[in-house]
Image: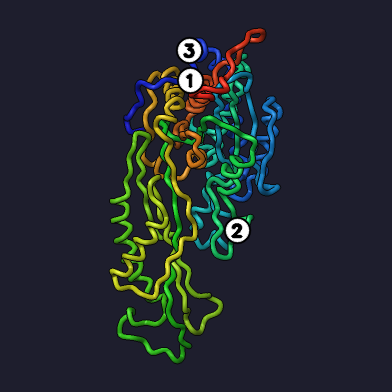
Amino acid sequence: MADGTTFPGLKAPAGVSDADKAAIAAAIDEQELVDLALTLGNIPSPARHEKAAGDFVYDWMAKEGFAPRKVGATPTRNNIIGTFGGKGPGKNLLFTAHLDTESPTFDPDHDRYKYSAETLANPEWQTCWLEDGVLRGFPIANDRGPMSCFLIAAKALKTAGIDLSGRMYLTACPGEIGPEPIEELRGVEYLGKDIGAHYMFNHGGIAPDYAIAAEGCDFGLTWVGSGYSVFRIQIRGQGIFTPLLTHPETIAGHTNPIYKIPAVIEALHEWCKSFEAASRYESAGGVSNPKSQIAAVRAGVPHEFGAGTEIANLYLEVGLNPRQRACDIQHALEDMLREKGIGGVEIEAMVVRHGAEADAGEVAPLVAAVDAATRLTLGRPVERAAPVYSSMWRDHNVFNRQGVPAITTGFKRWRPSPKDLVDSALIYALTALAVCGRAPVAGKTSAARPVYGDNPFGSA
């Protein structure tokens, strides 16, 4: 699923050839790649429980000679960082994918308030398998399938005897999906993105020129990434001892704030529709269509009844295109409630993750490299990814916000075939070669980067 937009006329930092494709393709073992994806995908790794999957990646990198390191904000939630190449003056390209997979928490006291029994019983939450020629399971789709592809890409380059001039960073991060500390679920234990790629960027000993968030994009790419925010909309009222309560004629006159929830929800519903219509953002790198909806409701304490409650909370999730900021959303929500005449409401931003977008000129060499790799592998140019992939958070946001041009790209998002994985690994390997360049042949010297001049860091 791509939108048909291509990227003609761009030039990659280094060239790749049919001979490169043949050598690397011959070094990719389809069965090994599928086995790696299934083995890694079948290690349970819901958010906050990524240690076993991270340890597996570390051991695999160590066995294959990629000198891995563990860099973590906590002992059980490490970023795994391996390196290949770095033998000359080429550009550095970082690949990242996340270890956590969307799933219930498997804490029954939480899950029963969000999921039906049938949903909880879905085996694809934490297990993966090959069936009818396609790979099934959420961990394959998001995100250990793409992770396996760039791991095998690095191994294929090594097996083919192609060393890289620049560095190819191989990274596996916790916390991309979440969670987020909110209300009583607070502290380091509930951190998500802060201890993943963001922590790795600042403390991981990495210095990429470009970055790729390896995720399913149906072989398209985008350098646009959306953010998100969660607003607590607190409705206040008065608790009255139930035996003393006199029911008003309408719910609008009730002192219990729970009775005010319908009016607030109706107002939010209308606001969400207009917000979404006005928030579409398009650039050369992708389309962002932010969405919004109420994520949760909390009101009262069920085991401490007798006087209703004085507080009712709605939690509104609002997507953010790369140009939107949470402060503007808060102002808009407050203005809307005032115009509706709904008082006694306080709005607070509980979570804010702003989106990002690479500079089109700065990211162009990376896009050209993916395009060249896609043409060699699939026989067609790479296309801009469908809007859904630029309307969500992915970790290319981390790098673009830090000034490192980054994209997200990868295989067929849902039900990929073994061939899809092989094609994706080949594209990743050819992209790394086109960005990092081939390492100098032993005994020959190459021109070093200039230290002074108009462009002291070399050209793209």
Picture disc at residue 17: 3
Q: Nearer the viewer, mark 1 or mark 3?
A: 1
Q: Residue furthest bottom?
A: 244
Residue flagged by tag 1: what amino acid is it? Pro
In the rendered image, is residue 403 in sight?
yes
Residues at marks 2 and 3, CA–CA distance in whole angstroms: 52 Å
Task: Mark 1 and mark 3 in contact? Answer it, CB < 8 Å.
Answer: no
Residue shown at 47%/72% (left/top)?
A: 299
From the top left corner, tell me how far across and down residue 128 is, in percent: 56, 38
Q: Which residue is mark 2?
A: 107
Of the 4 image quadrants, the one containing the N terminus is top left
Picture disc at residue 13: 1
Q: Which quadrant of the structure image shows residue 167? A: top right
Q: Nearer the viewer, mark 1 or mark 2?
A: 1
Is 82 displayed left or right of 299 in the figure?
A: right
Q: Which quadrant of the structure image shows residue 386? A: top left
Residue flagged by tag 3: what amino acid is it? Ser
Q: Is residue 374 above or below residue 145?
A: above
Q: Is residue 293 above or below residue 308?
A: above
Residue shown at 35%/20% (left/top)?
A: 9
Circle 1 sits in a helix, a strand or a loop, which is it? Answer: loop
Residue shown at 29%/51% (left/top)?
A: 278
Residues at marks 1 and 3, CA–CA distance in whole angstroms: 14 Å
Residue flagged by tag 2: what amino acid is it? Asp
Circle 3 sits in a helix, a strand or a loop, which is it? Answer: loop
